[in-house]
């Protein structure tokens, strides 16, 4: 696989399942449990950062934010809310389809939702860094710090796994 290709979805890994001696049902159950574990980590982080963002509005210095900082803040709150919805999506999906023999669809859709959640988390982390550095050190420092966090996130989450796979 080249570095530009998207890795296979957990629902589409029959070769690895054959090597493990798993049935399709066992593979789907294993992939579902892996997705749930990933969601536990991302949900906790998203909730902590989301709580931090919501608490900011009640701080005395919040009224000192300029228009740019206020816009970044509102975008971050919205992104945190949408990311939380995305992270909870697989749970709701499973609840609604549980017992309907739809594990393949559940795993496939949950995989997409987890990937979208990770994009949201990356945006929240880098955006929060932009906002904090902007308030403390100024606009250029905020943009540099946020850009750096985004680059590091891309390197660790996308580039490193592709390099490790080689």
Image: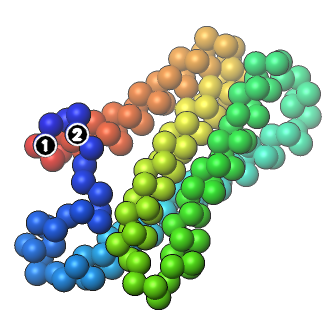
Q: Secondary structure at mark 1?
A: loop
Specify the farthest residue to the left. 19
* Displayed quadrant of residue 10: bottom left
Residue 69 against residue 1 in the figure, above or below: above
On the question of residue 131 being in view, the answer is yes
How far is mark 2 from mark 1, CA to CA? Answer: 6 Å
Q: In the rendered image, which residue does mark 2 sit on?
A: 5
Q: Callout 2 environment at 10 Å: few (<14), some (14 to 19), or many (20+)? A: few
Residue 64's spot in the image, x, y percent? 88, 23
For the residue pair 114 and 76, the one nearer the viewer reads as 114
Residue in view at x 51 percent, y 79 percent: 97
Are discs 2 and 1 less than 8 Å apart at CB? yes
For the residue pair 104 and 149, the one nearer the viewer reads as 104
Residue in view at x 17 percent, y 45 percent: 164
Q: Secondary structure at mark 2?
A: loop
* Quadrant holding the N terminus: top left
For the residue pair 51 and 98, the one nearer the viewer reads as 98
Residue in view at x 74 percent, y 32 percent: 73
Residue in view at x 60 percent, y 50 percent: 83
* Quadrant holding the C terminus: top left
Q: In the rendered image, which residue does mark 1 sit on?
A: 1
* Displayed quadrant of residue 110: bottom left
On the question of residue 37 being in view, the answer is no
């Amino acid at each position: 696989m080249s570095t530009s290709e998207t890795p296979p979805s957990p629902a589409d890994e029959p070769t690895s399942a054959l090597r493990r001696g798993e049935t399709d049902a066992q593979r789907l159950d294993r992939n579902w449990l892996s997705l749930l574990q990933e969601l536990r980590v991302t949900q906790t982080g998203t909730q902590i950062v989301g709580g931090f963002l919501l608490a900011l509005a009640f701080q005395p210095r919040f009224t000192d934010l300029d228009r740019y900082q206020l816009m970044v803040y509102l975008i971050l709150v919205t992104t945190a809310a949408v990311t939380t919805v995305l992270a909870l999506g697989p749970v709701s999906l499973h609840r609604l389809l549980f017992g309907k023999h739809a594990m393949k669809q559940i795993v496939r859709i949950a995989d997409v939702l987890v990937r979208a959640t990770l994009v949201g988390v990356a945006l929240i982390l880098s955006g929060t860094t932009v906002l904090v550095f902007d308030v403390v050190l100024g606009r250029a420092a905020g943009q540099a710090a946020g850009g750096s966090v985004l680059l590091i996130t891309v390197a660790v989450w996308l580039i490193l796994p592709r390099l490790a796979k080689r």
